[in-house]
Image (spheres, grey):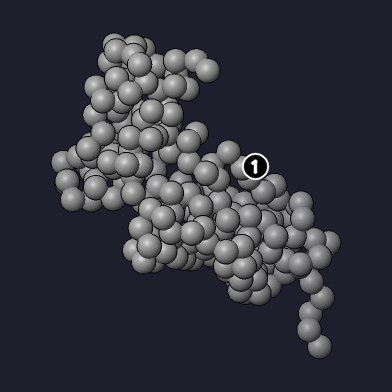
Amino acid sequence: MGTRDQILDAAAEIMRNRGVAQATTKEIAKAAGYSEAALYKHFSDKEDLILNVLRHRMPGQDSARPEPGTDTVEDNLAAFARMALTFYQQSLPLLGGLLAQPKRMAAHRDSMRRHGAGPGHAIAGIARYLRAEQELGRVDTDTDTDTVAAMLDGTCFHQAFLRFYEAGPDATAAPDELARSLARTLSRGLGSSTRDGHGPAAEAP
């Protein structure tokens, strides 16, 4: 394992136990067995390190994103939901402390923007997927893809929050049926062939 991966592992462990706001680069470097100077050879700043932990050390982020035209739209929305539920439940303890520190939160927000990241990008990704399905005729052209994406991602965040609120870091993972139910409910409002994957659905008699 290289220096970068060791630093990411140490950062992820410390952030899970103490939260992002309390995890210093000095402590992270020490836990990884390196100096702060070594840390900064691989990451431009703490926000860059946080972003890489979220991208590469959070469950679900290494899963392949659904491709338009493959499987069914319902199956693909369920896959997005699984990734979101897992990611939010794991990342809540990392980022929660930021909300209580406005200046720290502002610095984090600005850094995420510089790196082209942040919570809004998850919604944008789902919306792009749905627009591609519209072009393939598998989702009605009058579907508001941004709203559907926000509903899916927002519900996943809320469900993850509720699970964490009830049981803390030891909360069990969301059941697969929750992801499937969210996808099923949303797909029924998309108006096209979200189940068989073979183009627009026939109109109901």
Q: Would residue 82 be seen by someone viewing this image from the given angle? A: yes
Query: In the picture provided, is 170 more to the left or to the right than 133?
Result: left
Q: Quadrant of the C terminus?
A: bottom right
Farthest residue, direction bottom: 205
For the residue labelled by badge 1, is the local secondary structure a helix, a strand or a loop?
Answer: loop
Q: Counting other residues with Cα less than 10 Å from the Cα at mark 1, is it few (<14), some (14-19), or many (20 or more)?
A: few
Q: Is residue 94 above or below residue 35?
A: below
Nearest the camera: 153 or 86?
Answer: 86
Nearest the camera: 173 or 95?
Answer: 173
Dividing the picture into quadrants, the one containing residue 23 is top left
Q: Amino acid at mark 1?
A: Ala
In the image, what residue occupies the spot 76% across and 51% down? 70
Q: Residue beneath label 1, please?
A: 64
Query: In the picture provided, is 25 more to the left or to the right than 12?
Result: left
In the image, what residue occupies the spot 57% across and 67% down? 178
Residue 85: where, in percent of width, then height? 50, 56
Nearest the camera: 127 or 87?
Answer: 87
Q: Would residue 147 be seen by someone viewing this image from the given angle? A: no
In the image, what residue occupies the spot 77% across and 55% down? 71
Q: Is residue 31 above or below residue 127?
A: above
Residue 154: where, in percent of width, then height? 44, 62
In the image, what residue occupies the spot 26% across and 25% down? 27
Residue 115: where, in percent of width, then height? 39, 31
